[in-house]
Image (tube, coloured by chain):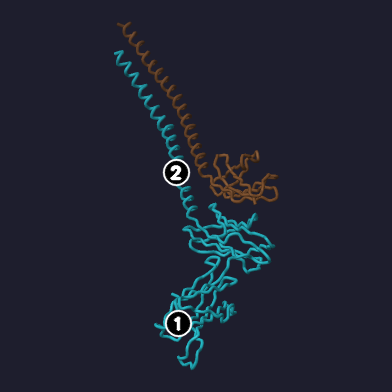
């Protein structure tokens, strides 16, 4: 009987102890684990967001081109080309040590023109122009530091290089072309920059460089001195090429090369 | 017989009392342990969550030295916080640390720090370090114009 009584007493306390233990597990330990787990989850989420941010930052790629509006103009235009795979948000433009806030979004593979920015330059002034994005990338001008000297901007030499193939020799010649060319280059307004400029076309190929003051579209007309024939009683000029070409500097090259090919009685640019 | 029966009746009280006492002891001790463990675990959970949040804030800091200018003898430094948390920064140029107080920059915000009479010659290369209270760094190499 005493043994049975003692066991009965221990049983009650054991049940109570077990209940308390289970209570501790459910009311303290499990909530603590849940809180820790949730904190870990938030941490992992944040880490993932940061990885995405870093990846986007690395994918951001802007090209900044600064171009004066004219050779002696105080205003410059900024062209920003987004060559990256993500939308870029330009928030600031730095011109030397002065900044200007911006709010420009540039979609991927597109460009945005900003400005004009009046720099009010004086002789010897240099301008380091930069663009900053909200992802913390700073881009310098692809065209380098702008310099103003002797009342005008020091820029790249702009021009068009015309490259002619070998002129047809006597043996293979089936046309009336001689070795004299005259080149006419006109701008988009029709003003002649080079008018009937003489050029010798060598039998072994020739080229000539025509310097231009600004970027833009130019019409190139090439005439050749020909023997009689084709309705002409004597030697005469015939047009063999008439085409338009553009210098897109600063986005494109400052010098464009035009390589001609002979196609019948004309020149073509393949 | 009567006395024996009376003895039996008296003996029945002791197990009840002892059971009650034992249960009371178990409940008391259990309650104490329960309260202690709940408090400890709550504190542990809060500490852990706080440390994780602090760690998350630390790794979330993103900032750059976006521009440095040297005008006359003034060195001026611009800092941009492009991260998602507010930061507090100090500047170190070479081995010299400037400003005793932490400069606060809210997230997405800018701050410029100006120093006076920083001795430097043209062509000198300065290594500028911006560091935060959470011990993140951003470096900038500046050549004095």
Give x and y (percent) for residue A27: 43, 32
SS of the residue under disc 1: strand
Q: Is A147 placed left or right of A36 in the picture?
A: right
Most foreground residue, B105 or A253:
A253
As drawn, the label of residue A175 is none
Q: Chain of mark 1?
A: A
Q: Is B53 placed left or right of A154 in the picture?
A: left
For label 2, the crowd category at 10 Å Cα-Cα, with few meaning under 14, some 14 to 19 and many 20 or more, is few
Residue at 51%, 37% in the rendered image:
B50
The residue tagged 1 is: A266
Most foreground residue, B23 or A53:
A53
Quarter of the picture holding the N terminus of chain A: top left
Q: Is residue A65 above or below residue B68?
A: below
Q: Chain of mark 2?
A: A
Chain coloured brown in the rendered structure: B
* Image quadrant where residue A131 sits: bottom right
The residue tagged 2 is: A44
Q: Is B57 placed left or right of A30 in the picture?
A: right
Most foreground residue, A118 or A196:
A196
Give x and y (percent) for residue B142: 60, 49
**Chain A: drawing colour:** cyan
How far apart marks 1 and 2 lie (CA) works out to: 68 Å
């Amino acid at each position: 009987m005493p043994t049975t009584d003692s066991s009965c007493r221990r049983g009650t306390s054991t049940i109570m102890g077990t209940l308390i233990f289970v209570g501790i597990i459910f009311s303290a330990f499990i909530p603590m684990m849940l809180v820790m787990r949730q904190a870990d989850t938030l941490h992992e989420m944040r880490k993932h967001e940061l990885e995405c941010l870093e990846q986007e930052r690395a994918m951001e790629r802007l090209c900044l081109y600064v171009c004066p509006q004219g050779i002696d103009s105080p205003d410059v235009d900024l062209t920003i080309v987004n060559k990256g795979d993500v939308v870029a948000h330009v928030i600031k433009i730095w011109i030397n040590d002065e900044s200007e806030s911006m709010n420009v979004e540039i979609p991927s593979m597109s460009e945005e023109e900003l400005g004009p920015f009046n720099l009010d330059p004086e002789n010897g002034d240099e301008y380091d122009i930069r663009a900053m994005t909200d992802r913390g990338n700073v881009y310098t001008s692809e065209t380098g530091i702008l310099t103003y000297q002797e009342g005008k901007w020091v820029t790249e030499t702009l021009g068009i290089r015309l490259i002619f193939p070998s002129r047809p020799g006597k043996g293979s010649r089936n046309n009336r072309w001689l070795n004299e060319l005259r080149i006419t280059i006109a701008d988009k307004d029709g003003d002649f920059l080079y008018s009937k400029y003489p050029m010798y076309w060598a039998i072994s190929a020739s080229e000539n460089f025509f310097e231009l003051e600004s970027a833009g579209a130019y019409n190139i007309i090439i005439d050749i001195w020909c023997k009689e024939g084709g309705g002409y009683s004597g030697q005469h000029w015939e047009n063999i090429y008439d085409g338009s070409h553009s210098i897109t500097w600063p986005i494109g090259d400052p010098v464009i090369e035009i390589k001609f090919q002979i196609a019948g009685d004309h020149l073509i640019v393949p | 017989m009567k006395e024996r029966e009376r003895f039996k009746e008296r003996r029945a009280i002791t197990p009840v009392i002892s059971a009650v006492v034992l249960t009371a002891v178990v409940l008391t001790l259990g309650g104490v342990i329960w309260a202690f463990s709940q408090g400890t675990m709550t504190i542990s959970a809060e500490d852990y969550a706080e440390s994780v949040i602090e760690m998350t804030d630390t790794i979330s800091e993103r900032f750059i030295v976006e521009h440095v200018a040297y005008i006359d003898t003034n060195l001026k430094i611009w800092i941009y916080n492009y991260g998602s948390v507010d930061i507090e920064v100090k500047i170190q140029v070479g081995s010299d640390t400037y400003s005793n107080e932490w400069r606060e920059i809210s997230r997405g915000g800018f701050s410029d720090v100006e120093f006076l009479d920083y001795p430097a010659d043209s062509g000198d290369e300065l290594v500028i370090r911006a560091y935060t209270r959470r011990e993140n760094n951003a470096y900038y190499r500046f050549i004095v114009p």
